[in-house]
Image (spheres, rainbow, N blue to C red):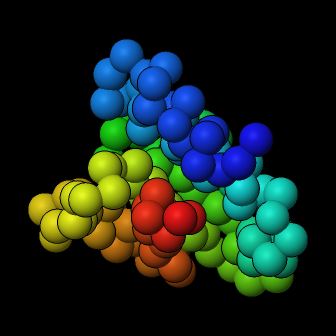
Amino acid sequence: MTLQSLLQIYRDEARTERDKGTYFERFALAYLMHDPLQFDQYEKVQTFKDWAYENGWDGRDTGIDLVAKLRNEDGFAAIQCKFYDAAYRIKKADIDSFISASGKALFKRRVIIDKKCLE
């Protein structure tokens, strides 16, 4: 199975845009945990909701989709996943809440994973 065919399955199987986003977030989480280059960067990757629960934060949607503990240094990476149509160009308004929520000192990195970067 190719990456493109997997992404097409996500598009076909998703009932809503939210479902499609959730599928892509799960894919991104697996990628960050298992890709050798990413493994060198991060020691633990979680959904924001799970991370928030473990760290005493409110787990409501803030624009951060995933949180990764940085390997060999203090702090975390805030991660936003975007699974828009290939023709769509991400706008500032699409990531405003992510930029705001990830502006806390404990977030040392901001990462945006866009489906286009995988093609």
Count of numbered marks? 0
Residue at the spot 37% in from the left edge and 16% down from the top edge: 15
User: Is 116 in front, or is 47?
Assistant: 116
Single out the residue that lies furthest toward the top: 15
Residue 60 vs 79, above or below: the answer is above
- Residue 64, image x and y in percent? 41, 53
- Residue 109, image x and y in percent? 52, 78
Residue 73 image-quadrant placement: bottom right
Residue at the spot 35% in from the left edge and 29% down from the top edge: 18
Residue 78 is at least partly visible in this image: no
- Residue 34, image x and y in percent? 83, 57
- Residue 38, image x and y in percent? 75, 71
User: Is 5 in front, or is 28?
Assistant: 5
Residue 85 is at least partly visible in this image: yes
User: Is 22 in front, or is 63?
Assistant: 22
User: Is 1 in front, or is 78?
Assistant: 1
Question: From the viewer's perspective, is 6 left or right of 97?
Answer: right
Residue 9 vs 30, above or below: the answer is above
Residue 15 vs 5, above or below: the answer is above
Residue at the spot 40% in from the left edge and 49% down from the top edge: 83
Where does the N terminus fall, quadrant-wise? top right
Residue 55 vs 39, above or below: the answer is above
Question: From the viewer's perspective, is 10 left or right of 59?
Answer: right
Question: From the viewer's perspective, is 59 left or right of 16?
Answer: right
